[in-house]
Amino acid sequence: MTDYVPPKVWTWDRESGGRFAAINRPIAGPTHEKELPVGKHPIQLYSLGTPNGVKVTVLLEELLALGHAGAEYDAWLINIGTGDQFGSGFVAVNPNSKIPAMVDHSTTPPTRIFESGAMMIYLAEKFGAFLPTDHHARTEALSWLFWQMGSAPFLGGGFGHFYAYAPTKQEYPINRYAMEVKRQLDVLDRHLADNDYMAGSEYSVADMAIWPWYGALALGLLYDAGEFLEVASYTNVIRWTKQIGARPAVKRGRMVNRAFGDPASQLHERHDASDFDTKTQDKIGKTA
């Protein structure tokens, strides 16, 4: 393979980028006019059941399980493969055109929230749950939440892209990002050796943010890379992963806006708790 020599000025090659070439572009803004639907609940979520989307649906389901009726929500499917994220309505909520995006209609005017970490803090503070009130525990939870926001791109756009999605397999980027992902798993494993949850003894938004990425990786559900990365060797991560995955709200949250995998694990849209009734508890259990 010949070395790539960068040109003096980069130009956009529309055909590069593999399976994502049709939706990746170097400019922002909408590509078409399309308003977002609005359902009956104050909280409107526009998302897809990728790890970043699952963070928020898990938190909403956990809030509902805790008895916070105000956390009822409508979840609308945004198909990023066909460019739904570039519709004018979605861009108005999230100018970065990434899922998830959320609007809280309980405020006047309605509040838009984008970036999954911001949504988790917003919801935790709105309902007073899953973000510790103790100074040290709260700071720990926020530190790990932001650790996830900064670390996951190396796992997703880095390792995941070059290992699973790039048009050709290249040794250097795969090795570079595999090394970083294993370092991240070691960070988690060392921390969880002495802690039940990410913020200590209390289950929090930090666990809900990290689990859809690193829990799915530990279970072999992400990029089919479990053997390649020897994830089974991170025993504390495995223990934590199974502990979080057994929670009913986590199982439900992972189904919402899911449009791939086992059909029994998919709930494309969620507008009421009864939407889960078509899925037996046995089927819901398969999604953990």
Image (cartoon, rainbow, N blue to C red):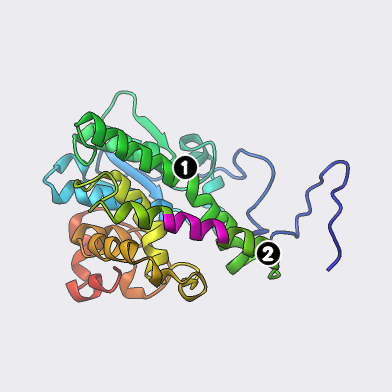
Residue at 56% x, 42% y: name it: 33
Sequence-first tag of 1 and 2: 2
Residue 232 falls in which quadrant of the image? bottom left
Residue type of the residue flagged with mark 2: Gly
Q: Position of residue 180 (x, y in %)?
A: 55, 56
Residue at 68% x, 40% y: name it: 27
Chief secondary structure of the magenta span? helix
Q: Name the mark nearer the viewer: 1 or 2.
A: 2
Q: Position of residue 92 (x, y in %)?
A: 49, 35
Whether residue 119 appears in magenta in the rendering, the answer is no
Whether residue 185 appears in magenta in the rendering, the answer is yes
User: With respect to residue 38, does 219 lie above or below?
Assistant: below
* Circle 2 crowding by C-alpha within 10 Å: few under 14, some 14–19, many from 20: few
Residue at which label 1 appears = 35
Closest to the observer, 147 or 13: 147
The C terminus sits in image quarter: bottom left
* Mark 1 and mark 2 residues within 8 Å of each other at the beta carbon: no
- Residue 263 in view here: yes
Residue type of the residue flagged with mark 1: Glu
Q: Position of residue 127 (x, y in %)?
A: 19, 35
Residue at which label 2 appears = 18
* Circle 1 crowding by C-alpha within 10 Å: few under 14, some 14–19, many from 20: few
Per the image, label 1 sits on a secondary structure element best described as loop
Separation of residues labelled 1 and 2 (CA atoms): 29 Å
Q: Which residues are magenta?
A: 179-186
Residue 240 falls in which quadrant of the image? bottom left
